[in-house]
Amino acid sequence: METVQKDDLDRLLTTMLESAEGISDLLFVAGRHPLVEAHGRLQKFGDAPLASARIEGLAKAIINGNPRLVEDLANRGSCDCSYAYSDAHRFRVNIYRQNGNHAMVLRRLASKIPSMDDLKLAPAFREVIMEKNGLIFVTGGTGSGKTTTLAAMLNEVNLTHPCHIVTLQDPIEFLHPHHEATFSQREMGRDYYNFPDGMRAALRQAPKIIMVGEIRDRETMEIALTAGETGHVVYSTMHTISAGQTINRILGIFSKDEEQQVRERLAGCLRYIISQRLVPREGGGRMLATELMGSSLRTREAILMGESESRRLSDIIEAGSTMGWHSFEQSLLKAFERNYITEETALLYCVNKPTMRQRIDAAKKSADTPSFASLKMREEEKAKEAPKPKPPVPTMPTPSMPSPAPTMPAKPPVPSMPVPTMPAKTPA
């Protein structure tokens, strides 16, 4: 093992972070160059591949003799921790063994807590944070920004609601200052031993909101359901890609005999499921695409009785657009129509490809053939842009001499009717 000083590690990490824009992860794997992930793409850093001894030395500098991390790495093959060397540089670290060698991945953590406006979250997200009880899930794949979205939502609560918020994380990623709300941020391995123990303790810490970094097992889910049923709001994440898959994953945690009971409890306390993906943006970078499903009579029925041909969650979500709900297809189609993403990206990141293809074709056709409404709008815009004619300049009337009074024309003589004459009488 190569000995690495903390200062050397800090300089290496700083240099790697400065090598490109939009870096989210740093990877160290034996036999490969150090790698940085920028906007979802891996790039090489440095001139030489890494030896296992070098990575082991870097990992030892991060572990810094912590007995829990040493034990986890030895017994479980991996360990999770956080690492920071200044207020502006914080990382979530996973150190593991692969093919008999050490390896590690460092996820860069933002130093500034984003706002909901910074992330351009839909207005419906402000309705989500108004909930007073129940379960709210933010789901997506690894690196899709679930924790960032949760941090933005809790930050909005922090600015507007005086309440106690308990967070259970592994490790702590965003450090929330105290504003209107009061935060108790607990880190696994340092402040509690495991998520079930942390959840049980949280119920006795008078919280209004409990944020669980990730629900991974049956016991934690059981306590989360109980918390949602007893007047707490529970925020958590899951590694699922849609609302329907999230419901199935929750049911799959429990046994078949418990399924109907879990359906009833879930239908009663589930409030929102937010699924999200980071998709490549036209011109570089990435943008957030989301799916949002809330609680209604139809969603509760679908959860309670299961999905069927006439009861699909995807259809229910799209029918709830008046409440701000939306599917991935609707989000991606809107981004495509605004030229934020390409057609290929929309098809790659959607859930239902045939539906997405039909909607893209319809959008392209409508763009080529303007509708009557768009034509009318264009005519109105042209009318507004056309210069208005100037009003005529009034002229002063010219005085004139009064004209003599007109004479009436002489009436034509009325023809006289001949007077009949009586014949003269003859003398008798």
Image (cartoon, grey):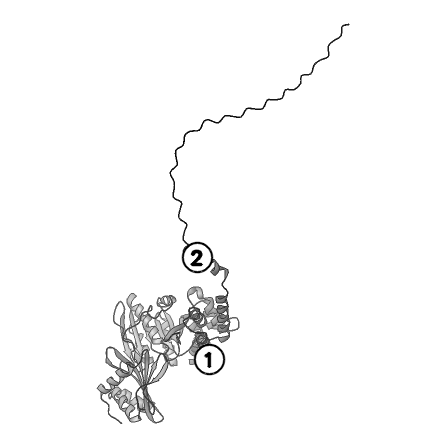
**x, y (%) of residue 60?**
26, 89
Residue at disc 1, secondary structure: helix
Q: 222 or 163: which is nearer to us?
A: 163
Quadrant in the picture for the C terminus: top right
- Which residue corresponds to the image point at 42% horizontal and 65% vertical from the top-left? 323
10 Å crowding of disc 1: few (<14), some (14-19), many (20+): few
Q: Is residue 310 left or right of residue 265?
A: right
Q: 145 or 320: which is nearer to us?
A: 145
**x, y (%) of residue 39?**
36, 78
**x, y (%) of residue 286?**
37, 75
Q: Is 331 rendered above or below residue 219?
A: above
Residue at disc 2, secondary structure: helix
Residue 167 image-quadrant placement = bottom left
Most distant residue in the top direction: 428
Distance between the alpha carbons at the discs numbered 1 and 2: 68 Å
The tag on residue 382 is: 2
